[in-house]
Amino acid sequence: MRLDEIPLSGYGYASSTPSPVNRMMADFALKFRDGIDINLGVGYVNERAIPKGLIEEAQREVLAHPEKYRAALNYGGSKGSVNLIESIRRYHLDNRIGGMDEEILESKEIIIGPNGATSLLDGVSHLLNPGIVITTDPIYYIYCNLLERSGFHVLAVPEDEYGIRTDLLQKSIGELGEARQEIRFVYIVTVNNPTSTILSNGRRRELVRIVTELSRDLNRKIPIIFDKAYEDLIHDHLAEAPESGFLYDDLGIVYEVGTLSKILAPALRIGYMTGARCAFMRAMVQRTNDVGFSAPLITQEIASYIMDHHINDQLTKVRVGYRERAVAVRRWIDDAVGDFIVDIRGGRAGFYYYLTFEEGIMTDEGSPLHRFLSRTTGDPNIDGSPIEKKPRVLYLPGEFCVHPAGSLAEVGRRQMRLSYGFEEPGKIEDAIGYLREGVDYVKGDSDITYPCQHYRPAMGTNHNI
């Protein structure tokens, strides 16, 4: 007798097919050949940017001082470590993050997510009724994929060099008509992933104004969530200092999500949310309790110690290191494939470049370029063999980074996100050399061998990360 499969919810059924990021991370974990393959796809931070010595020091201090770091190896409160919350608050005040002062921060609450910033975003998807979520196109594909599996409809509005286009946002809201009632929240990554476009302060003000007016029009508060995952990694000295959305928030609809993954270590799993004290924030704390009581208390206290004693030095090191990489990688991209690129974004914050190739050079899964870089062409001269192992180059295809129902769906098939965060500079330049070989292959010049070493400028041996 054949039994039916376990019945799944709508979310469960959608989740039974691995998402793009699930597949990529599994591929990296299981198939990546250290020393051979090159990861420009999965957005890991550089290993040398992780302050292993400071983490060891912090762990010793935390365990040696139970009077301050109480029961650090036990369960913690679901709102988060009192020490860590105070460290985050002090960090924002001491550095005037977002232009906030003590009065603004005193009016807000800070909570710690159960498992990084992503767990807080996941909590939002559980606590709000499904409906329309407005975001930027290109989209943060990981969260938008989760939202759609959870029953939300994503309305993606294109960006320009200043961030989401607020003129198109107002137009899109107007075109919804009565369906505006279905808008649940607005989600904006302030240094966009995948493009690393920095949201300008002018656009941020406009966003808050538009959502404030919409809230009044609909007679209910519509949250606007600013995801600041990469905001601490703005390394272009010419970039304006970001202002907090709290500065313009009259209704208490702005929420900010931050993380320590990019500046300390992803494995600490520290994400936090700041917002007005309200039922929504209380529900977020209860969600943390429901899925694991709290974030691991030991990692919260380790993060608190580092923030109290070393955070500014660590930030300087990370920013200088990624800036150095950004400048070098842009030069290599321009030299190697610049003639085939019609648009390039990024390089001012975070650790991504987002490339748009000319017509005819496709980047989507199964395209000739993708098959070349993944060594799946079927030609052993290109793919290599067990004896001659040819490097695979992992990148994030643009088809995953644009909304399939949006206006950028077609051009996304000619785009890719390249990360300069994880690999060492020499490996990144080699990868860009293989990218040029792939472009030559696509254009029919498959017998051309690109000299990777030719474009490697002297960087010295003292780069930071």
Image (cartoon, grey):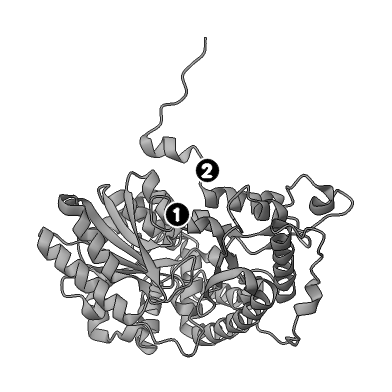
Residue 313: image quadrant is: bottom right
226 left or right, relative to 333: left
Residue 365, image x, y percentages: 60, 49
Name the residue nearer the viewer: 149 or 414: 414
Identify the residue under disc 2: 18
* Lateral position of residue 278 relative to residue 231, left or right: left
How far is the residue under mark 2 from the one under mark 1?
21 Å
Q: Residue furthest top?
A: 1
Q: Residue at x 59, y 56 (%)?
A: 362
Which of the two discs, 2 and 1, labels the residue nearer the N terminus? 2
Q: Residues within 10 Å of mark 2 (few under 14, many from 20)?
A: few
Please name which of the two marks, 2 or 1, marks the residue nearer to the observer.
1
Task: Give the number of the disc on residue 3.
Answer: none
The quarter holding residue 34 reads: bottom right
Q: Position of residue 105 (x, y in %)?
A: 27, 79
Residue located beneath label 1 in the image: 409
